[in-house]
Image (tube, rainbow, N blue to C red):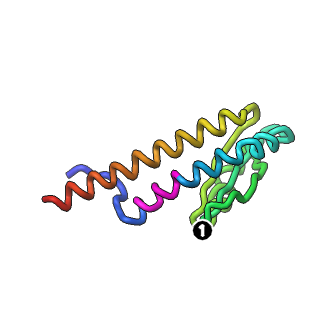
């Protein structure tokens, strides 16, 4: 039997919510890129949207601390996107669109697999 990962209703809901959250990141593209101007060397910018789909701001994070800091910033079901120096507002919007597209595909796959299992 092929494993398809998490096909739970929670995973399906998370995919749907991710589509909505991607729009929040895109809406704040200018704010995100404005904060890249003062990004210190060897840092990245971590933009955060909380579980209520509210833009929570950005954080300058040393690259060496990224793996520790991202989980802290994704508290309680939030989302993050990481950006490096030189990222433009168009880049932010494009990545947000890609995020939404992947989430839509994930939701559709969960729906197809769930329906197929139900019809057996």
Most common secondary structure along the magenta stretch: helix
Whole-percent x, y for residue 34 in the image: 81, 41
What residue would you read off at disc 1?
76
Which sits in the foreground, 28 or 120?
A: 28
Q: Is residue 9 left or right of residue 79?
A: left
Mark 1, secondary structure of its residue: helix
Q: Quadrant of residue 8?
A: bottom left
Which sits in the foreground, 12 or 38?
A: 12
Whole-percent x, y for residue 53 in the image: 62, 61
Q: Is residue 49 magenta?
A: no
The residue sitting at 60% across, 61% down in the picture is: 78
The residue sitting at 67% across, 61% down in the picture is: 54
Whole-percent x, y for residue 107 in the image: 39, 52
Q: Is residue 105 left or right of residue 2?
A: right
The residue sitting at 19% across, 62% down in the picture is: 118
Which sits in the foreground, 27 or 84?
A: 27
- Where are the magenta residues, as a range? 12-19
Question: Of all residues shown, which one is farthest toward the bottom?
Answer: 76
The residue sitting at 31% across, 52% down in the picture is: 4
The quadrant of the picture occupied by the C terminus is bottom left
Q: Quadrant of residue 93?
A: top right
Q: Is residue 17 left or right of residue 57?
A: left
């Amino acid at each position: 039997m092929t494993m398809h990962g998490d096909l739970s209703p929670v995973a399906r809901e998370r995919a749907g919510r991710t589509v909505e959250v991607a729009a929040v990141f895109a809406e704040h593209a200018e704010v995100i890129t404005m904060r890249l101007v003062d990004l210190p060397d060897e840092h990245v910018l971590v933009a955060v949207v909380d579980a209520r789909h509210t833009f929570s701001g950005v954080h300058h994070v040393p690259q060496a601390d990224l793996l520790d800091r991202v989980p802290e910033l994704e508290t309680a079901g939030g989302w993050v996107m990481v950006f490096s120096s030189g990222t433009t507002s168009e880049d932010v919007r494009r990545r947000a669109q890609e995020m939404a597209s992947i989430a839509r595909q994930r939701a559709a796959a969960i729906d197809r697999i769930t329906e197929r299992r139900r019809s057996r």
